[in-house]
Amino acid sequence: MRVAVIGGGPAGCTAAYTLRKFGCDVHLFERDNRIGGRTSQIRKEGFNLGTGALFLMGGIYPRTNAILKELGHDKDVVPWKPTTHIVDWDRQRYTARFDNVTSFIMMPVFNIFDRLKIVIAVVRQLISPGPKSLFDGAELAQYDHGETLDIWSDRVLGKKATNYLTLPYMGFLYAVPLAWQSTPLFQGVVQQFYKLSLQVPPEGVGQFSEWLIEGTPGLDLHLSCSVQAVHARDGGGYMVDAGGKSYDVDGLVMASEPGVAADLLANIIPQDSAVKLRNCRYSEYAHVQLCYKKNPWPNFPASVALPATDLRNWGACVLLSRRHPNSVPPGGEAVGVYFYTPPLENMTDEDIKDEALIAVTEVFGAAPEPDFIEIFHYKRGLSLSPPGHFTTLNSLHAEMPNGIVLAGDYFAHAGVEAAVLSGERAANRLLGK
Ligand SMILES: Cc1cc2nc3c(=O)[nH]c(=O)nc-3n(C[C@H](O)[C@H](O)[C@H](O)COP(=O)(O)OP(=O)(O)OC[C@H]3O[C@@H](n4cnc5c(N)ncnc54)[C@H](O)[C@@H]3O)c2cc1C
């Protein structure tokens, strides 16, 4: 079977890898000059900067782990145990470890009664049914009862736990207000807290896609090659227009973002399906990396700072050399400042850089001017999954014409595991498995 995979993020790379394993002829088209999508890395003046993703998440990323093992790279990923400062509205700080949920409960901001309430809620949650895979949209749909995460967290864990546990966690992962999110992913994290750990490939999360491509011999990879149009062929199959050529294929994996899939497939899929794809909500997202050739804070006692309330514009400050030593030249440091979505609507890139400098001084202390600042500003950064999202998106699979399958993290919450799972499933659907 000849297949075109459109989009070279982790979803498309996983689909291409799976299809080649089963002997398909695969063309992978990627608009950028590098693979990895929102996980890709860029190199500049000795720094290796992540354009998006920061880490993999251990036991709650089972398909990612299985593929790392198949590729022989499971032992290469570097564990990250980030000491984390939870910064309160009055600048009081509490110390925890992001990869260890129990360390949050031990923070002195919680008294014995708060802790008891949280522990009882967690035990109740542990014995309740919940999604086994936290990134499978079909499973998540079954546990989405229409409640938003702020209301669920206040009700089940208590207001204090919402501010000092749910908010810093989900703020770091998704950077949008809890009221914009549904509950199943966080409920699942609570149920599987003991499986959570953080890892980073030695060259950054983007290396995962690079490993997939290396592990896919015979793949026709087309970089800097945006797919312009897709046409249905008389008698079955499709023509894909990209880079001034037309490619004749039997199957298509759409692994771009949903709006692009809607545009490319507009004349091929039902109109309602195109509307569902176009209506998939995304957050605007920006992060800034402040790069210092000489580390201003070599002895700072934490590597991450997260606000305990959503009164700030930033959702996380991260000392990147601690996460991923190869991200900086020897003796250097890079700080990632990750912004909350709502304030971004009213901020220019200059405002974002200025705010990042203020945040870093507040969190880590005074420092000279950075050697350079890199800003990554996505108008469509992370897909959102408000109540109802999983059911709507999941229904799309059955609506696709023969030979077309959809992949992308947007079927679940954003995240590498969501992308990998969707890419693998898409390939298997095309292969009739
Ligand atoms: C700032 C940030 C931080 C994040 N942190 C984490 C994290 O720590 N851990 C984690 O697991 N996840 C994280 N994520 C989420 C993670 O990056 C995504 O879930 C993942 O990249 C989704 O993969 P994907 O393949 O579905 O989409 P993408 O990575 O977006 O890939 C889609 C690809 O399609 C290409 N494309 C689009 N249109 C066309 C076209 N017409 N022709 C050819 N190619 C096209 C794009 O160029 C892109 O490369 C983060 C994301 C952001 C933005």
Image (tube, helix red, strand yellow):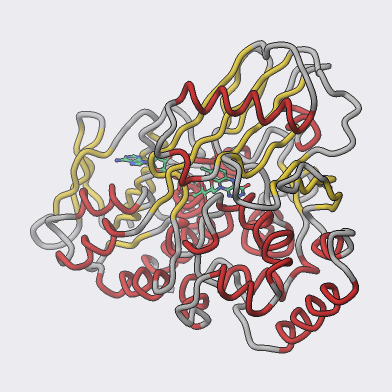
Q: Residue at x 25, y 72 (%)?
A: 399
At which x and y percent is residue 305? 75, 42
Q: Which quarter shows the N terminus?
A: bottom left
At which x and y percent is residue 23? 45, 56
Q: Which quarter shows the C terminus?
A: bottom left
Corner quadrant of residue 112: bottom right
Question: Between residues 370 and 20, which one lies in front from this camera angle?
Answer: 370
Q: Residue at x 91, y 27 (%)?
A: 299
Q: Residue at x 89, y 63 (%)?
A: 106
Corner quadrant of residue 51: top right
Q: How many numbered marks appear?
A: 0
Q: Is residue 49 above or below residue 199?
A: above
Q: Is residue 287 above or below residue 374?
A: below
Position of 302 compared to 417: left or right?
right
At which x and y percent is residue 330? 81, 17
Q: Is residue 287 above or below residue 6?
A: above
Question: Between residues 104 and 334, which one lies in front from this camera angle?
Answer: 104
Q: Residue furthest left?
A: 234
Q: Is residue 210 above or below residue 272?
A: above
Q: Residue at x 46, y 46 (%)?
A: 342
Position of 116 compared to 155: left or right?
right
Question: Between residues 397 and 216, which one lies in front from this camera angle?
Answer: 397
Question: Between residues 113 and 430, which one lies in front from this camera angle?
Answer: 113
At which x and y percent is residue 418? 53, 60
